[in-house]
Image (tube, rainbow, N blue to C red):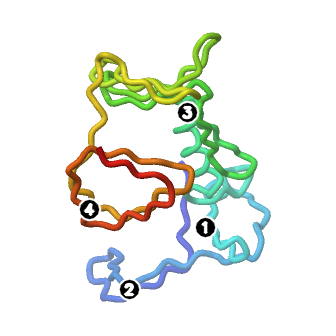
Amino acid sequence: MATYRLLHVTRTGNDTDGLAEFTNSDTVLLPVHSSDPTGTTEGEMIYNSSDDKIKIYDGSAWVVVGNTSEQIQDIVGAMFTGNTETGITATYEDSDGTIDLVVSADSALIKDADSDTKIQVEESSDEDKIRYDVAGTEVATQDVSGMAFTTNSGTVRHNQTQAATYTIPSGEGQVMAGPVTITGTITNNGTMVII
């Protein structure tokens, strides 16, 4: 059976029953070393003042009590790397202790939880456009020629009270259907048409 030795115990109180009685102010002092000593017995414990760590000799080496920063990084990194992610790749870089997040090249889709409302970028041999689907139905597409509303979409509409403050830049235009009440400030450097 192994024997254990507790070094330099400081306590207060009266020992009336042969048992050590400690208060919250009592301390256990470990041997302090500026470097790891030559270990001889498994279970020896020291405080390494240079490393600012408590260490235990495991029979062949001094090991830090508790997790090191590297061990914590490895644990957290493993939670990312190799896990199941959708549309993103997570990789733990052990060399610098960071986690790299890369959006997948095919993640050209923004959608709601049940995937019936979405904005999708389509790239194929005959299509290079953005599709807008609402409730599982395509309502509009946009490509280099402009935006097209499908027969399943509603109309483009605006509130007839315009409270925003904005500028129509030179070379751009705006069309509104009247009557229109403007409570904000519209600076027209381009073309504004009210029908």
Inspect this view and state whether residue 85 appears.
no
Above or below: residue 191 compared with residue 102: below
Describe the element under mark 3 as helix, strand or loop: strand
Q: Of discs 1 and 3, which sits in the foreground?
A: 3
Q: In the rendered structure, which amino acid carries the disc numbered 1?
A: Ile
Q: Position of residue 148 (x, y in %)?
A: 43, 24
Work out which quarter of the rendered image holds the C terminus and state it: top left
* Residue at the farthest top position: 126
Q: Where is residue 75 in the image (x, y as percent from the top left)?
A: 56, 44
Above or below: residue 127 compared with residue 85: above
Q: How far apart are marks 3 and 2 (CA)?
A: 52 Å
Task: Using residue 179 as the reference point, say whether residue 118 is left or right of it.
Answer: right
Label 4, on which residue?
182
Q: In the rendered structure, which amino acid carries the disc numbered 4?
A: Ile
Task: Using residue 1 as the reference point, say whether residue 183 is left or right of it.
Answer: left
Q: In front: 173, or 42?
A: 173
Q: Which mark is residue 25?
A: 2
Q: How far apart are marks 1 and 3 (CA)?
A: 40 Å
Label 1, on which residue?
54
Number of residues whose C-alpha sits closer than 10 Å to that of mark 3, classed few (under 14), some (14–19) or many (20 or more): some
Q: Residue 45 carries which label?
A: none
Q: Distance between the residues labelled 4 and 3?
A: 45 Å
Q: In the rendered structure, which amino acid carries the disc numbered 2?
A: Ser
Describe the element under mark 2 as helix, strand or loop: loop
Label 3, on which residue?
88
